[in-house]
Image: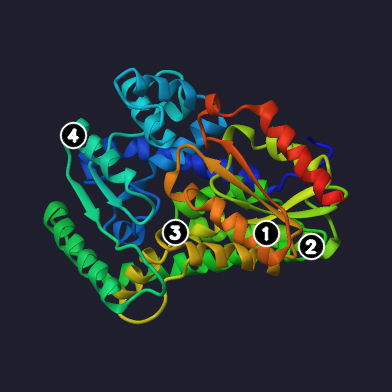
């Protein structure tokens, strides 16, 4: 794969940031006994800025699940959960997380630190509710739930206000639990850092609109981590400033992410983490570059101006997985048009039903209206038992041959 992929130098620094993050969270329980530090396990769609303003250290089991998938230990951890009665059809992130708790041998970073509290937001799916209820029982710790109404059409004021009131109640509950008041000035600074980081991430993604593209989606998948796990910090902002400069330099020098770029594609859904180089490299070897995707854009929402809790609620309620088919279709259409793509590939992800259910209808509509080919591949984001490589690559080959004709 070295002949077709040009890894970013940012990859190395990203790995260091994640290692430091997980090392720090491992130390929090020990420091907590002395300094009062606490760890919160959170879902990927939770308003982490509020938690950071309280001095909580957020930990993302979903991000850890992706790491387990990339390191090919997820399948074993899923089997640990299944041996306790959990269905093979459940989310492999959830099963990897539960499996790592019940069998913490030979896993990345020796597992996650024990949480002091849990915060779940159902703007990404309903599975997270039952997953975190299980965690709450397992650790016997508080669970805070933020309920976001599904958005059909444009968000309504009452929907945003409904979520904003929950955020205010969350603050009140955390103030009682932590015995400290929320520092609004600190929250505003964290929100500012989040917005600066998001703007840089958007800029990095937008460089792929140029030909040849200086980035491939593997660059985005690999370097998404800091935007999630250290969101709202100077560490994240500074990392993406450096990554932006590197990608900008590639663009100005005309350096392609994939040698011999022939086809430009859009990716939809969570990556196949255990196939980051083998699966996506199959495309790259044939001159196909994935110029953008829906997944890494999921954390590219700014928190706008106005009343602070309303603005935070508006940002987190409007994430794309909480939107209807029409929104999802139009989003993918805009990617295809703005990035001048020749086709698109959708990952029908066994684990993520919320992401995958509407894909076939979106595919039919986009192929009809735009006249570009679309491929659906069946797999799972971290559980390699659900990936039939030969079957998938045969379909990919036929898809690429169709692009050539």
Marks 3 and 4, the one that precedes in the sequence: 4
Q: Are marks 4 and 2 in contact (CB under 8 Å)?
A: no
User: In whole angstroms, how far apart are the C-alphas of marks 3 and 2?
Assistant: 27 Å
The answer to whether residue 5 of the structure is visible from this angle is no
Q: Residues within 10 Å of mark 4 (few under 14, many from 20)?
A: few
Q: Which mark is residue 233?
A: 3
Marks 2 and 1, the one that precedes in the sequence: 2
Marks 4 and 2, the one that precedes in the sequence: 4
In this view, 397 is above or below 294: above
User: Which residue lies at the image location 78% right of the left edge and 40% below the top edge?
Assistant: 398
Left or right: 95 in relation to 20: left
Q: Are marks 1 and 3 in contact (CB under 8 Å)?
A: no
**Near-viewer residue (275 or 2):** 275
Q: Which mark is residue 137?
A: 4
**Near-viewer residue (184 or 310):** 310
Give the residue pinned by disc 2: 251
User: In whole angstroms, how far apart are the C-alphas of marks 2 and 1?
Assistant: 30 Å
**Near-viewer residue (321 or 217):** 321
Q: Residues within 10 Å of mark 3 (few under 14, many from 20)?
A: many
Q: Secondary structure at mark 1?
A: helix
Q: Nearer the viewer, mark 3 or mark 2?
A: 2
User: In whole angstroms, how far apart are the C-alphas of marks 1 and 3?
Assistant: 41 Å
Q: Are marks 1 and 4 in contact (CB under 8 Å)?
A: no
């Amino acid at each position: 794969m070295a002949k077709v992929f040009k890894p970013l130098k940012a990859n190395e620094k990203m790995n260091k940031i994640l290692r430091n993050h997980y090392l720090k969270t491992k130390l929090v329980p020990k420091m907590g006994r002395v300094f009062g530090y606490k760890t919160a396990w959170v879902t990927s769609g939770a308003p982490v800025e509020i938690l950071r303003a309280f001095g909580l250290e957020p930990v993302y089991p979903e991000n850890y699940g992706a790491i387990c998938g990339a390191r090919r230990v997820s399948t074993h951890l899923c089997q640990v959960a299944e041996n306790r009665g959990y269905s093979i059809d459940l989310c492999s992130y959830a099963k990897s997380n539960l499996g790592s708790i019940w069998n913490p041998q030979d896993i990345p970073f020796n597992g996650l630190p024990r949480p002091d509290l849990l915060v779940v937001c159902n703007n990404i799916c309903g599975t997270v509710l039952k997953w975190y209820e299980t965690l709450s029982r397992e650790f016997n710790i508080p669970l805070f739930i933020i309920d976001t109404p599904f958005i059909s059409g444009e968000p309504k004021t009452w929907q945003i206000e409904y979520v904003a009131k929950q955020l205010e109640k969350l603050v009140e509950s955390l103030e009682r639990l932590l015995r400290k008041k929320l520092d609004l000035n600190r929250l505003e600074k964290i929100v500012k850092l989040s917005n600066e980081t998001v703007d840089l991430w958007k800029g990095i993604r937008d460089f792929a609109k140029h030909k040849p593209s200086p980035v491939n989606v593997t660059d985005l998948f690999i370097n998404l981590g800091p935007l999630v796990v250290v969101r709202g910090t100077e560490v994240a902002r500074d990392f993406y400033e450096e990554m932006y400069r590197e990608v900008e330099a590639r663009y100005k020098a005309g350096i392609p992410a994939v040698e011999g770029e022939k086809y430009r594609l859009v990716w939809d859904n969570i990556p196949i983490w255990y196939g980051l180089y083998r699966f996506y490299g199959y495309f790259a070897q044939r001159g196909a570059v994935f110029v953008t995707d829906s997944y890494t854009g999921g954390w590219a929402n700014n928190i706008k101006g106005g009343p602070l809790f309303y603005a935070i609620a508006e940002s987190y309620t409007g994430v794309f997985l909480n939107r209807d088919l029409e929104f999802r279709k139009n989003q993918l259409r805009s990617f295809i048009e703005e990035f001048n793509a020749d086709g698109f590939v959708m990952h029908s992800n066994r684990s993520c039903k919320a992401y995958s259910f509407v894909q076939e209808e979106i595919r039919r509509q986009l192929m009809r209206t735009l006249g570009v080919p679309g491929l659906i591949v069946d797999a799972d984001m971290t559980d390699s038992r659900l990936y039939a490589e030969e079957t998938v690559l045969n379909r990919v080959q036929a898809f690429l041959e169709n692009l050539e004709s």
